[in-house]
Amino acid sequence: MAGDRFDPARPVPRHVAIILDGNGRWAQKRGLPRTAGHAAGSETFRRIATYCRDIGMDYLTVYAFSTENWKRSVEEVSAILGLLKKYLLEALEKMERDRIRLRFFGDLSRLPKELQGLAARTLETSARYDGFQANVCLNYGGRDEIVRAAREFARRCAAGQSRPEDLTENAFSGLLDSAGIPDPELIIRPGGELRQSNFLLWQAAYSEFYYTDVLWPDFTPAELERAIAAYNGRSRRFGGIP
């Protein structure tokens, strides 16, 4: 992969998030079932996550399965969940070697019990390592995340553990799935669509966005480097004057 790097000395965002879009269209263009696109996309995730670790990134967050994706066909949902099971089993075998920590965003309670158990085992194993972390969004929606956090704060107030005036932006961030993780500096959307799709609504307040027509299964380290180069060419003012 070293040949895909444009400049080893260039700055690298600490946290990059990617909306994994285009798997189904990638398969349809090749006359394949949509499930084949998801299989190809899972291999792309493995390759990109390893590359992010190798170039010194701290966090990669990927939008793998949204709260709205349950509306897809039973066959497609089953295929996605089956690929997740396969990936988690492989991750548990290789975590010590790869040193890639995994964390999950989203409401996992709707996932099959076996997957919930694998996710819990993965988190337990990840806790033993330091360094690069991949965050996988499963049954995740930005609005759902905010509602769950608001309910938790309301519960704490009702229990006398917090007061309404205790709620600040930092305190609320600590109730989100991403608690303890810096907001993404860069959000990448492959697949040609120009929307946020309910992804990291709170965390993306000042993120830079990069859009590309490349479908996710075709996304390469070179394409990631183009996104990083575009990010490094921008001026982040956070509402102020540079």
Image (tube, rainbow, N blue to C red):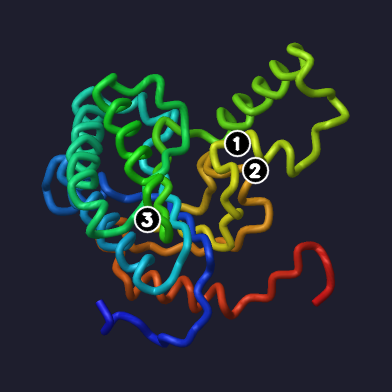
The residue at the point 49 percent across, 78 percent down is 229
The residue at the point 19 percent across, 40 percent down is 89
Task: Identify residue for label 2.
Answer: 202
Look at the numbered discs 2 and 1 and tell me whether their residues touch, using CB distance below 8 Å: yes
The residues tagged by marks 2 and 1 sit, at their Cα atoms, a distance apart of 9 Å
Vertical placement of residue 52 versus 45, above or below? below
Where residue 85 appears, as percent x and y from the top left, is 21, 35
Task: Identify residue for label 3.
Answer: 191
Task: Check the image and name the residue furthest to the top.
Answer: 158
Task: Identify residue for label 1.
Answer: 176
Q: Amino acid at mark 2?
A: Trp
Where residue 79 appears, as percent x and y from the top left, is 19, 33
10 Å crowding of disc 3: few (<14), some (14-19), many (20+):
many
Q: Amino acid at mark 1?
A: Leu
Where residue 240 appears, as percent x and y from the top left, is 83, 67
Q: Amino acid at mark 3?
A: Gly
